[in-house]
Amino acid sequence: MDLAIIEKIFAIVGGIIVFLVAVIAFWNDRKSVGIDNHVFKLMLVLLAVGAALAFFAAVGLLGNFPKAA
Amino acid sequence: MAVATLPHAQTADHGEVDRLYAETRDLRLNGFLLFLVSDVVLFSSFIFAYLYMRNTGQGWPPPGINRLDVAFAALNSVVLFGSGATMHYALENWKHGNFGRYAGLMVATIVLGAMFLCGQGYEYTTLYFREHVSWAGSGIFGASFFTLTGMHGFHVFVGVWYLTVLLLQSVHGVYTKQKYFGLTAGTLYWHFVDVIWVVLFSIFYLI
Amino acid sequence: MTVAAVHGGGIADHIHPEPQSFIRRYIFSIDHKIIGIQYIITGFVFLVLSGMLAELIRVQLMHANGGLVSNDTYNEIYSVHGSAMVWLVIIPLVTGGFGNFVMPLQIGARDVAFPWLNMLSFWMFPVAGLMLFSSFLIGAPVAGWTEYPPMSLQAGPGTSMWCAAIFLIGVSSTLTGINFLVTILKMRAPGMTFTRMPLFVWAQLATAPLSMVATTALAAALAALFIERQFGVPFYDPTKGGSPILWQHMFWFYSHPAVYIMILPAFGIISEVLPTFSRKPIFGYKMIAFSSVAIALAGFMVWAHHMFTSGLAPFLQLPFMILTFVIGVPTGIKIFSWMATLWGGKIHFTSSMLFAIGFLALFTFGGITGILLAAVPFDFHVHGTYFVVAHFHYVLVGGSLMGIFAGTYYWFPKMTGRLMNEFWGRLHFWLFFIGFNGTFLPMHWLGILGMPRRVPVYDPQFQGWNQFESIMSFVMTLGILIFFANLLVSIRNGKKGGANPWNARTLEWQIPSPPHYYNFKNIPAVYALPYDFSEPLPYTGLENELTDSPAPATAGAH
Ligand SMILES: [Cu+2]
């Protein structure tokens, strides 16, 4: 199998897992207080966004645009 | 990691966190967050420089340079983002007194961080040897890409050592269930490194 | 977090013993008062050095054909003069110097939040200064304090040294900003709400985020310049696809806020000196406080007004022009508030007050020429001429440096326990004020007539005014020499001032001069603003400060 396919499969699966873990962690922490926890929650949201971006990049929806003329 | 219980188990009779610690912790926490803010500004300035140069040239990537390998970067990003998730749960387990799980997740974080660095090394060598793209020799593309990702890689490198030191410290009982600001700071730093990568990944590989 | 953060109080009970060895006490001290004085001494040393460079410039310009130094040396002299005045004199003096000494005392704290970091910040400063001045040995920077590429890319190795030196002082400034911000936000005495803080503290509060954020942006620009010079990685070189305009954006994104890093703390000093010597509450406390914050925020949105002639797109010129005009509004609010403070007051013309009033006149003048420069058509005419030189000397010397002098006369008794001599202080003021205006006022019309800055020779028609300026600059220098003589003599022989020679009301004057290592025996509680001169002092818990009652128990070192 092509190396790129394996990379993509791992990225897709990993992206889903990390996205879910980040969302669950955020949900579990949603009521926590204190500036550190608020920052953690913001970071978890951005982490979920990052995982989603990696997922979409791996499935080919993002980042595969043809080279600009 | 043979230690199964938290080091603070022996000294738990100290009871509630003392007020002095709560206050110095508050100062250090705010100071550390501001340090991270200034680091964000440092990255933002270079990101501004990159976007500025990108929009003054003739298209991107500039003529003669191929697009970056998105699939591999996505995989490598997932590795780094995964380390952010393990780090988060490492701190959670510390707060709940599960030293074994904490240590396991810390090791996982450090390994994933090191894997990311290896991936970046692989990407750099591929670019250099196969595509002949280099820092100083490929115009503004090489300048912006290697400077920004290199700066981030340096932060990851520092973070891997930082977390290793924190792990060793916690094994030696430096932190307790009540007093663990060092671990909070380490987690904040590692999350920061992750989130910077979300931005860098987007602007170098996705747009 | 189970225990909520409590301001001041708790830290109060935690006092480290005073170190006894000379080195730990005066050299590598972690006491904010000593560090503040170290900043002030070091800053004054660099003021002397940069002033000598300035006099070299003035001597060179005595004749239209120059003749004192070579053209290259002239470039080096004004480049290092500008860099040193900005980064080694004014910024360290107003933030690290007066900020360190005064701010923790005024908020009723025992020290800043991170004393060790404070010491580290200080020691970066003399090292950076030595690096900058030693660049003369290897060919100092020649492209002015702004170091525009491509010239800064082509110049000799001294420019890389300049990058490293300014980067280092930038790191120091950033760390100080973080330190002060946490200190002011978290360590105020009980009862000192934001609207009860002295205005000098407000000024530092508005300045600290600027030092933190803007300076980091400068660090990025400097790092890129250094990398490009040393490794040939193209950022700014247009022949390799880079953009010299990029440097201008990054540099001015720092350097416009840097103007406020230099002037806001001086505003703070003036806001303390004016009410004290008018014996009248400050007019418009909240307006002065909030306008500092407004200036700091707006200061991030106007940087491109330095780039109107650099090929900035016309549709961008208009918003940058208007936003710059808008900054004049909060600044004007301050000026009017200060004048209203003087109005009907019982004014004491001490040296400090003379400098504060001189500040009002000169800063307002410099501010108005700043508004003129922000107007795009006018800027096209005078950009790169002596009009610009005149403008920024009015705000930085007539503004910030006059503020520094006012602050020195004002807080010298608190630092040493002795007063500076008033006669020599007034003489200093008049020589400086007359000399300053004589030096820089004619530059306005020379600039409008077209005399370009940064050029070692000029059109002979300007020679008369230039000779006048040079002579007046000697008068100004004489004033500064008198100031330093007064300073040195007064440290040993000045009249004893006691705890509160000015009858001022902020917290630092309610404790002995110089203050004890631990500042306050008991941390006071605050229940009103410090500017109401007809009321009793708004503090409780200060009864023992001026008595011989024992110091609080000190905790063991750990
Ligand atoms: Cu400006």
Image (cartoon, coloured by chain):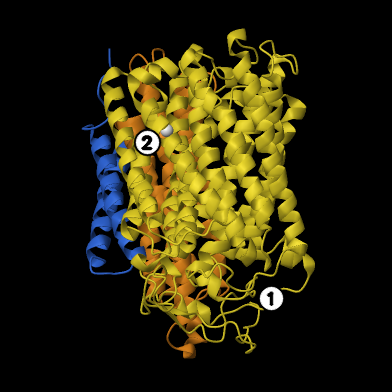
Chain colours: A blue, B orange, C yellow
Task: List the residue tagged with mark 2.
Answer: B73
Q: Residue at x 23, y 35 (%)?
A: A59
Do the residues at discs 2 and 1 belong to one chain?
A: no
Distance from the alpha carbon under mark 2 to that under mark 1: 55 Å
Q: Chain of mark 1?
A: C
Q: Find residue C209 and report its horizontal and vertical position in percent.
A: 43, 51
Q: Chain of mark 2?
A: B
Q: Amino acid at mark 2?
A: Ala
Q: Residue at x 45, y 81 (%)?
A: B19
Could you say which disc has been placed on residue C280 in the image? none
Q: Residue at x 58, y 17 (%)?
A: C151
Closer to the camera in the image, C558 or C168:
C168
What count of labels does the image hold?
2
Task: List the residue tagged with mark 1.
Answer: C18
**Helix, strand or loop under label 1:** loop
Q: Find residue C99 and report its horizontal and vertical position in percent.
A: 54, 57
Q: Quadrant of the C terminus of chain B?
A: top left
Location of ligand 1 given as a quarter of the image: top left
Please identify the quarter of the rendering in which residue B23 is found.
Answer: bottom left
Q: Are marks 2 and 1 in contact (CB under 8 Å)?
A: no
Foreground label between 2 and 1: 1
Please identify the quarter of the rendering in which residue A35 is found.
Answer: bottom left
On screen, B58 above or below C89? above
